[in-house]
Image: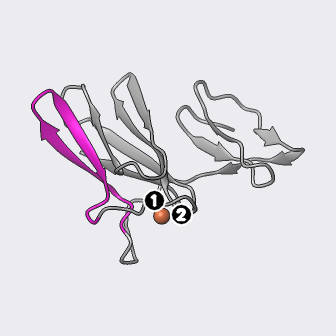
Amino acid sequence: MAKKLEVYKCERCGNIVEVLHGGPGALVCCEVPMKLMEEQNADSSTEKHVPVIVKVENGIKVTVGSTLHPMEEKHNIEWIEVINDDYVQRKYLAPGDAPVAEFYVPYSEKLIAREYCNIHGHWSTKK
Ligand SMILES: [Fe+2]
């Protein structure tokens, strides 16, 4: 059963999907069940993945992470996403970009920032 905003990955072809509306069925790709990319929220290594939310003049700035994450061809942050109540905004990144995104959303206690590392998976933090 898929739930709204969950992220799933096909471990055969690399497709990644985000659920817009949950349903009772299992998500399948390449004839195998897709893997739920659980949100991690505590770094145990020196490499930092947990997004950091900071209030800026016109909204918020999200940085990955407390020490900047690499943005190399083989290891990088693919996107940063902010969930603010009923709104979702996503910034796609490419190798060479800074692992940072600004969003023009009100700063609130309900903010959730998520990011996806192509090697270490899905990470989140709540304001
Ligand atoms: Fe990583």
96 to the left or right of 24? left
Please tell me in which quadrant of the rendered image residue 42 appears: bottom left
First in sequence: mark 1 or mark 2?
1
Report the front residue among 30 and 2. Answer: 30
Q: At label 1, which amino acid type do we have?
A: Gln
Q: Which residue is mark 1?
A: 40
Q: At label 2, which amino acid type do we have?
A: His
Q: Position of residue 117 (x, y in %)?
A: 50, 56
Residue that lies at the very extreme toward the front in this rendered image: 96
| Residue under the image location 43 percent in, 48 percent down | 115
Residue that lies at the very extreme toward the right in this rendered image: 31
Report the front residue among 17 and 13. Answer: 13
Q: Is residue 7 above or below residue 51?
A: above
Q: Position of residue 34 (x, y in %)?
A: 74, 47
Quadrant in the picture for the N terminus: top right
| Residues tagged 1 and 2 counted as in contact (Cβ below 8 A) | yes
112 to the left or right of 36? left
Q: Is mark 2 within 8 Å of ligand 1?
A: yes
Residue 120 circle label: 2
Q: Is residue 57 magenta?
A: yes
* Alpha-carbon span between mark 1 and mark 2: 9 Å
Range shown magenta: 48-67
Main SS class of the magenta portion in the image: strand
| Residue under the image location 39 percent in, 61 percent down | 49
Please tell me in which quadrant of the rendered image residue 7 appears: top right
